[in-house]
Structures are given as structure tokens and as C-alpha cells.
Amino acid sequence: MSAKLAPPKTRRARFQDLGIRTASAAVLIPVALLGLILGGLVWDALIAVFFIGLLREWRALSHFEAPRTRDRFLVAGLAYAALPGLALLWLRNRPDVGLDDVLFLLLVVWMTDIGAYIVGRLIGGRKLAPAISPGKTVSGAIGGLAIGMLAGMIFAGGPLGLLPAAAISVVSQLGDLGESALKRHLGVKDSGNTIPGHGGLFDRLDGILAAAPLAALLALLAQGGLPLWR
């Protein structure tokens, strides 16, 4: 007897985690934007709070790592959280362009994530990396890249935003895949329970953690106090 094919997912089933994503965004995005706009000590304190939260999650995750590699795992986690934190602090504190730099970064990462989610759920198709994250599709990755680039171009006011937005979009998606691979390696569903009912900070910030150091590098290459997309 031939095996029955699984019925295609209904539109409601495809978007069943939309409520969770919306709820976490409704909490994190206003907090991040308020701290970003205020800048100074408020932004520094916000990054410090996130850094401490990430380290707490990483320490909890270390218990799922083999004892012989646990110390290296903890050191890797320190770098994983510290490097993006330092990048975000440096970017925001750049004279005149700091606010725009971080807004550009956040906008591209957020729109990439939203675009990948919507396009991937609507179109579906070939899986991007089924062994790592079965829910991600090639169509979603392309859609996320396209929407992230469009958002970057609009924010920058012209085509100068396309290339840095593309680089940030790609790296943020790789960061998402990397975090999924880590959770699969450890055998856990979420990175933690920092956000009740919605997982951990790593689950929500994986794209930004990967893309922030790249954004800082692009800003360094720009030199002359220019925004990172010039």
C-alpha cells in the first residue's frame, strides 16, 4: 500500500506562529527604538541588559553541551554576545550618523525577517536547509533578501543602500540559520524562556547579532563620518 501524502497546509496553519512573532515584536521593537532614539546612557544600559540576558541564556544552554567542550562553549558565547554589543554601541555613538546607522541596520534585519516569513509561508517550495531548519525555504530567503534590500534603498534615499542592505540581509539570514543549527546540536527547541511563551533572546535577536558586526565594518570602511551605506 502506498504511503499517503500529507495534506497541504492551510493558510491558517502556515501562519500559526504569527501571533507569537507579533507579540514578541510588540515588546522588543518599541523598547529597542526608544533606547535607540534617546541614545547615550539609555542606549548603553539597554545593550548591557540584553548582553546580560544573552549570557544567562548561553550559560543555561551550556548544560546541554558535552562536559569536555563546555568551557570552550562558554567562551564562544561570550564572544557571540559581546561582539555585536560592542558593534551596536560604537555604531550608535558615531557623531551625526549613529542613529541613522543603527536604524538602517535594524530596518533591514527586521524587514528581511518579515519578508522571509511571509514569502516563505505564501509560496513555500524547496527547503533552504532542511537538516538545520525545516521551516525555511529558498523562496523565503529570496523574498527576505529582496524586501530587505528594498527597505535599505528606501531608507538611504537611493540605490546606495542596496549593496550594504544586501550584505546585511544575507548575513542576518545566515545568523538565523546558525542559531537554528546550534539549537539542533544541543537538542533544544528554544534558546531560553527570557520572553515568556516566546522563547529566548537569541531566538529573537539572532539576525541582529550576526549583522551588527558587519554593519560596524561597513561603517568603518565608509570613513569620514559617512553613514554605513555610503
Image (cartoon, grey):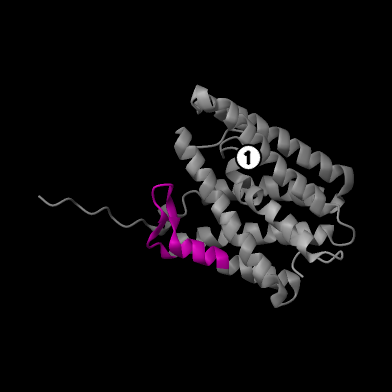
Residue 103 sits above or below residue 201 on the image: below
Residue 107 at what x, y percent from top left? 69, 60
Q: Which quarter of the rendered picture does the C terminus lie within?
A: bottom right
Q: Is residue 126 left or right of residue 5?
A: right
Residue sitting farthest toward the top? 67
Magenta-drawn stretch contains 162: no
Total count of labels? 1
Q: Is residue 188 visible?
A: no
The picture quadrant where one finds residue 74 is top right
Residue 25 at what x, y percent from top left? 64, 49
Q: Is residue 104 visible?
A: yes
Is label 1 in a helix, a strand or a loop?
A: helix
Residue sitting farthest toward the left? 1
Task: Please state the extent of the stretch shown in magenta in the rendering.
Answer: 123-145
Q: Tell me the crowding category of disc 1: few under 14, some 14 to 19, or many 20 or more residues within 10 angstroms, Cα based.
A: many
Q: Which residue is mark 1?
A: 201
Residue sitting farthest toward the bottom? 158
Residue at figure coordinates x 80%, y 47% from the top left = 89
Residue 150 sits above or below residue 174 on the image: below
Residue at figure coordinates x 50%, y 66% from the top left = 142
Residue 216 at what x, y percent from top left? 74, 55
Q: Amino acid at mark 1?
A: Leu
Q: Nearer the viewer, residue 89 or 68?
A: 68
Residue at figure coordinates x 53%, y 24% from the top left = 63
Residue at figure coordinates x 78%, y 41% from the top left = 46
Residue 166 sits above or below residue 212 on the image: below
Residue 221 at what x, y percent from top left? 76, 63
